[in-house]
Amino acid sequence: MILVILNLFTFMATLDGSIVNVALPSISRDLNLPLGHTQWISSIYLMAICSFILLFGRLGDIFGKIRVFRIGTIVFVVGSLLCGLSGSLATLIAARIVQAIGASMTMANSQGIVTDIFPANERGKALGLVGTFVSLGSIAGPGLGGLMVSSLGWESIFWINVPIGLVAILLGARLLPGDIRISKKSIDGAGSLLFAGFIVSLIAAILFGQEAGYGDWRILALFVFAAAAFAAFLRLESRRDEPMLNLNLFRNPLFSLSILCGFLVFVSMFCYNIIAPFYLQSILQLSPRDAGWMMMIYPLVMVVVAPLSGAMSDRFGSEWLTFLGLLLMVGAQAGLASLHAGSTLVRVGAFIALLGLGGGLFQSPNNSLVMSTVPRPQLGVAGSVNSLIRNLGMVVGIAVATTTLFGVMSGRAGYRVSGLIPDRPDIFLSGMHVVFTVSASICVAGALLTGWRLLTRGRRGGGRSESESPGAPGPASGESPVSGERSSASGESAGSRGPAKA
């Protein structure tokens, strides 16, 4: 039941990062807005999540991950209600920020709650289900959004969160246990401001750069400011006794490499997420509803595969599964790069299904690798780093896909292109082929990194799984996974309402 509650909000929070894109034309028409202005309705959500997510991971470690998660569920539902009631761009953007704050509170702590509550032999399966709903929410947006907007209007994509969220809040009030561990640490206000400045300037530079060009001096200035803010943030965090982000986490090569591979996979996923609707509707001439059903193949395959891969990671270890998943994604992206105007729906669906299979095999074990290599007092921050990287991957994936697509199309057309050219599907297909080739290359990079790690561990004779490693946060010998004791040595207090385990 804890997983049901966590996954409901995980799905809704990640879904709202991608589902709005489909509704932008309807929102633009109803609110009398230029289409370019409505892009901020989608972008501001991801920007706010990335800005706040590390802070709420830190607050989860200090005040309790379950407590912060509970508050986040209420904030998210209120934000969703306000989004549906908005009658102007300003009020809708403000409501999206409220919604994003609630989403970041839940995202930052859901994986830490799972890792804290579930014992090591069940953790991979549990994280696998969380990973399934993360990917489902991220990739199901265009398909599900197209169906809802065409039938119920754009407000429905926000209002649907309200009844589902209220049910999850009521279940959480009754079923979620008290926090197991609370660390007595201070809040890093300066680090939070520097990190927010870095995220806002970086994402703004990426988004504005697509319109003005990345050679524009204002875009370059934003990139320079982002780099300076990030450097100052790292310098500050390395000198603080109680930093918001413990940089020692990244000294663990298994954690760092798993985080990097997760970032690369989400960049690749969102290249597909941006290009596929254009190909299905403009080239294959499918209706928005049929295109939505075709794109739903990906999340449906993941529903089946990700829990299985999570269970397999508990039994056999995670690294080989992530490697296999990346290889399958390379094959799927290469297949998508070979599609053309006469490709059959069976062939298109097969490559989409293969992409879902690879993603399902990768996501759950990779989440398990990330969360099983950090000490318990830092689970909140580790989970928020994982969620931050995922959302940054979405933003970078959108930028890579659109910049590459329109760059290739402009070269073929002989003038600057920022949209589809009527009666010239060949120019779009040229751009699409390059985008999917780039996307496949990104997955190749991840596969090479994972393969190199497997090779070096094999030479050292390191064959045991991450759950058996000394740094894993699983219970110590003879210790219950959920402890009711107070640890004076570590300065952490343990709650007394942890769920009993037979």
Image (cartoon, helix red, strand yellow):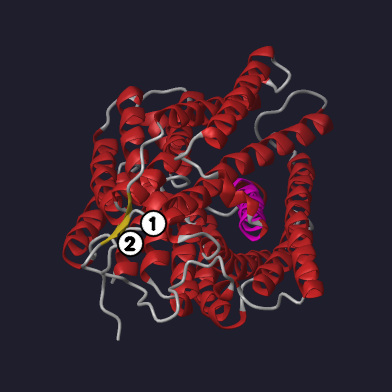
| Quarter residue 232 falls in | top right
Q: Is residue 276 visible?
A: no
Compared to 269, does 40 lie above or below? Answer: above
For mark 2, does the 10 Å Cα neighbourhood hold few (<14), some (14 to 19), or many (20 or more) residues? few
Q: Quadrant of the N terminus?
A: bottom left
Confirm whether the magenta stretch covers residue 270. yes
- Numbered disc 2: secondary structure: loop
Q: Which residue bears the numbered disc 1?
A: 490
Which region of the structure is painted magenta? 254-276
- Numbered disc 1: secondary structure: loop
Circles 1 and 2 in contact, beta carbons < 8 Å = yes
Residue shown at the point (80%, 70%) measured from the top left: 455
**Residue type, label 1:** Ser
Residue shown at the point (35%, 26%) measured from the top left: 31
**Residue type, label 2:** Ser
Q: CA distance from mark 1 to mark 2?
A: 6 Å
Q: Which residue bears the numbered disc 2?
A: 487
Q: Is residue 400 left or right of residue 172?
A: right
Q: Is residue 18 left or right of residue 361?
A: left
Specify the principal SS of the magenta part: helix
